[in-house]
Image (cartoon, rainbow, N blue to C red):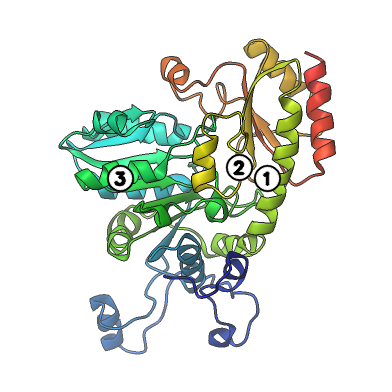
Amino acid sequence: MSRKYNHFETSVIHEGYDAKDMLGSLATPLFQTSTYTFTSAEQGERRFAGEEDGYIYSRLGNPTVTVLEERIAALENGERGLAFGSGMAAVSAVLIALTKAGDHILCSSGLYGCTFGLLTMMKEKYNIDHDFSAMESKEMIRSLIRPETTCIYVETPINPTMKLIDLEMVVEVAREFDIPVVVDNTFSSPYLQRPLELGCDVVIHSATKYIGGHGDVIAGLVVGKKDFLDSVAMTTQKDIGGIISPFDAWLLLRGLKTLPIRIDRHCDNAEKIVERLKTHPNVSNVYYPNDETNPDFPIMQKQMKRGGGVISFDIVGDKADAQQFLNKLSFLKIAVSLGDAETLIEHPATMTHAVVPQESRMEMEITDQLIRLSVGLEAWEDIWADVEQALNQL
Ligand SMILES: *Cc1c(COP(=O)(O)O)cnc(C)c1O
């Protein structure tokens, strides 16, 4: 689906929906229905045979969900979108579709904890192997590609270390071997980064985060070429069944309308907090893509519009100090997830990345004193005041 409107800010509100198709309703109607009636037995036969367009059963398609799928496809500049019941339903549907027993997946070193868990399960149960690579150069990537590699799977920015991977470089190597590149674009949202425009093949979102934006939905989205997504829709989505509910699709359509405004505010706030964290004596390292002192800053300038709303930092001290810091916060919320209106703060080593074995965690540079901060939409002065008073108590 190419975008119908010239500006992203207009697309988030209008793509994929025409009120005149829906009795003039301004808001996308919520089709809270499981099945669709046929006017005759022959029509049912034609629908199942794919000879006639139309809805059959909501696991195979729902009009509210269709609007969301068309909108996200347009926003990512992809041919087709698919919605899922969670980010992990989306990740698993894509990875299972791209692999069979004996295959190999090359991943960025640093992945969402449950994606790491899924890869471990795929290896143990189905003999689908994987390797991790920092992907800092073409040689580094090439050296780990095998004849059985069927997918390169990348997160950038990497959760929670906020390291970046140069997507154009990954695509150049992938093309040499004709391997698809899948990008988890959750941390950026399509407003900040559009991997398909850089030549990547598939984009995945945990829509739970910035796309929903209000901490009230768990959902996933996938965008890519029509052929591949048609096959996902008819196999791993239909038969494993991790579909989204129509109501959650409706909430995401509502959240998307304010995506650019929210993300700009998240970025404005994050930039202010980063400046201050960098000068605090109880903070030893600050990781944020849009920071000139960050070695990945040139990559951020190449492929991201801004740095996003997530900051990670090491506090001076150990795990107990990290936990004490969290306990001293007054109104900022200790919680995993990110991208909500509320500032959320967590301890990756014991929370989001607790499933990752200690040794792999160290390789990923997830130290015991690393804190992940998802900067919310509150006044940055209030966010900083709370962080600062808790840091001062260390
Ligand atoms: C949250 C998250 C996921 C998983 O999404 P769910 O909606 O929680 O299933 C995957 N990747 C990243 C980067 C995430 O932050």
Residue 178 placement (x, y as % from top left): 21, 48
- Left or right, residue 391 beside residue 169: right
Asked if one can make out residue 186 in the rendered structure from this viewpoint, the answer is no
Label for residue 172? 3
Residue 87 placement (x, y as % from top left): 47, 47
- Left or right, residue 27 beside residue 180: right
Q: Is residue 344 above or below residue 134?
A: below
Query: Secondary structure beneath disc 3?
Result: helix
Q: Earlier in the sequence, mark 1 or mark 2?
A: 1
Q: Is label 3 within 8 A of ligand 1 (CB to nearest ligand atom)?
A: no
Residue 329 placement (x, y as % from top left): 79, 26
Q: CA distance from mark 3 to mark 1?
A: 30 Å
Evaluate if marks 1 and 2 touch, with contact meaning CB atoms under 8 Å apart. yes
Q: Which residue is mark 2?
A: 307
Q: Residues within 10 Å of mark 2 (few under 14, many from 20)?
A: many
Image point 40% across, 53% down: which residue? Answer: 198
Evaluate if marks 3 and 2 touch, with contact meaning CB atoms under 8 Å apart. no
- Left or right, residue 325 beside residue 358: right
- Label 3 or label 2, whichever lies nearer to me, is 3
